[in-house]
Image (tube, rainbow, N blue to C red):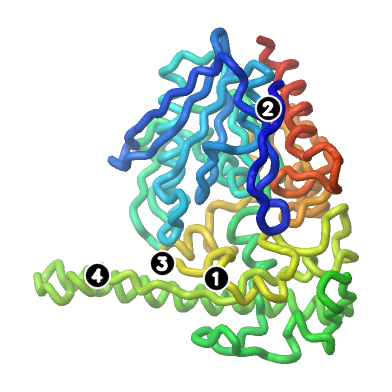
């Protein structure tokens, strides 16, 4: 493999060193059209003679330069990195629509003549692909016809080729399940980012918070009360999202008979939700809760007591429809545990022992839920984004790639 090149490092290891693309790699860029007329883009990197292609996707992020790309190419596999219609702009991310984007990519790869197609879901890409496998494995007439908000998204008419294998690396349990653990229940007023309910404040020493960088110790009673309050805040936002969807639906119904431009405008108004403080999982700062090798801090930085109040975070600005489809644990279809029984192809689950999104308790439940007869669960040392646990140690991505490559070679030899 070529020598590594430096990559920018931000936050808690979100960007890590990546190897160079191997010499001889053929790179092509493609625009493909989904069954509902959306245009999405993908990059195919392949080598002469490659018969197996690995797909990397995420519902919200651009994975063109994912750290595993050169690692997989160096092992002789072609790699397809594709975006959804919501890449880097997830304001209106409807997961059911994202499945149409996945389907278009799988059709493209099938038509390219690859003998084997493998999905590789990292982080949020894990639930995206689990959801795809679940729906693609159903008879077409049993697939979903609408998103949770009622928006028509007809999966029954889509060509959804079923991949030959699935790999999951550090998959979190779904955007909705993830947000329910992250959301700060001490927000007293949804219109005020600084409002606080003191007895629920995760960053108050009175509740067990220690000096930043030092592991906190929250009483069990506080943890239970906190998690209950998190679920209650999600439910309150659910109610607001449903009310705003209803307003648009009512205006749309009125317009059908009134033809009043005011009703038409009212039906189109997005009524966007602003969700403050979504970086507050107690496990970020209390390393004794669901312990593993993770460092102190969240996916976004070493100071959750600060990043929780900043702009960066999950689900901060979202349409009601996207909230219901993606971010609500109560209404989303894109939940790993719900979808996992529908993943019936050979499956490799790679747990990173320093993960702060897929914790040991999550991994155990997720692996047990998978519907395949051929399932392997492997653990490698690394952080959620594939970084090393300590300076000078191998990266989690390189260790994971070795396991993934060996597992694939056993089933799809070059």
Quarter of the image that includes the C terminus:
top right
Taking 190 as reference, is 181 left or right? right
Q: In 3D space, how far apart are the residues under numbered discs 2 and 3 (Cα atoms)? A: 37 Å
Q: In this picture, is 142 found above or below 414? A: below
Q: Determine which of the numbered discs, if any, sits on residue 319 in the image.
A: 3
Q: Secondary structure at mark 1?
A: loop
Tell me, yes or no, if residue 330 can be seen here.
no
Residue 78 placement: quadrant: top right
**Residue 390, how many percent across, how many down?**
86, 48
Q: In 3D space, how far apart are the residues under numbered discs 2 and 1 (Cα atoms)? A: 33 Å
Q: Which residue is mark 1?
A: 311
27 or 92, nearer to the observer:
27
Q: In 3D space, how far apart are the residues under numbered discs 1 and 4 (Cα atoms)? A: 29 Å
Quarter of the image that includes the N terminus:
top right
Task: For marks 2 and 3, give the one nearer the viewer.
Answer: 2
Q: In 3D space, how far apart are the residues under numbered discs 2 and 4 (Cα atoms)? A: 48 Å
Q: Which residue is mark 4?
A: 267
Q: Secondary structure at mark 2?
A: helix
């Amino acid at each position: 493999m070529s020598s590594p090149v430096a990559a920018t490092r931000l936050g808690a290891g979100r960007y890590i060193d990546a190897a160079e693309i191997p010499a001889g790699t053929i790179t092509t860029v493609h625009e493909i059209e989904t069954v509902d007329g959306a245009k999405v883009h993908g990059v195919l990197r392949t080598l002469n003679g490659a018969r197996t292609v690995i797909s990397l996707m995420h519902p919200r992020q651009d994975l063109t330069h994912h750290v595993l790309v050169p690692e997989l190419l160096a092992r002789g596999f072609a790699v397809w990195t594709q975006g959804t219609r919501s890449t880097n702009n997830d304001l209106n991310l409807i997961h059911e629509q994202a499945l149409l984007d996945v389907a278009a990519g799988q059709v493209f790869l099938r038509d390219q003549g690859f003998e084997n197609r493998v999905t590789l879901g990292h982080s949020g890409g894990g639930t995206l692909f689990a959801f795809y496998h679940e729906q693609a494995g159903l008879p077409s007439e049993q697939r979903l016809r609408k998103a949770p908000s009622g928006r028509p998204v007809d999966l029954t008419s889509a060509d959804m080729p079923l991949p030959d294998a699935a790999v999951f690396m550090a998959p979190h349990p779904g955007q909705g399940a993830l947000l329910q653990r992250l959301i700060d229940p001490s927000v007293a007023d949804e219109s005020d980012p600084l409002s606080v309910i003191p007895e629920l404040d995760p960053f108050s020493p009175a509740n067990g918070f220690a000096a930043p960088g030092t592991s906190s110790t929250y009483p069990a009673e506080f943890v239970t009360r906190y998690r209950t309050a998190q679920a209650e805040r999600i439910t309150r936002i659910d109610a607001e999202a449903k009310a705003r969807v209803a307003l648009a639906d009512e205006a749309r119904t009125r317009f059908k008979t009134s033809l009043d431009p005011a009703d038409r405008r009212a039906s189109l108004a997005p009524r966007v939700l602003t969700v403050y403080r979504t970086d507050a999982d107690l496990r970020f700062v209390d390393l004794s809760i669901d312990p593993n090798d993770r460092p102190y801090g969240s996916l976004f930085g070493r100071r959750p007591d600060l990043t929780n109040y900043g702009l960066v975070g999950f689900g901060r600005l979202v349409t009601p429809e996207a909230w219901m489809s993606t971010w609500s644990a109560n209404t989303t279809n894109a939940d790993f545990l719900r979808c996992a029984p529908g993943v019936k192809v050979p499956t490799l689950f790679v747990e990173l022992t320093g993960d702060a999104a897929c914790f040991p308790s999550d991994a155990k439940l997720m692996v047990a839920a998978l519907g395949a007869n051929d399932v392997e669960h492997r653990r490698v040392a690394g952080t959620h984004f594939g970084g090393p646990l300590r300076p000078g140690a191998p990266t989690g991505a390189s260790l994971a790639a070795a396991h993934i490559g060996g597992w694939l070679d056993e089933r799809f030899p070059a």
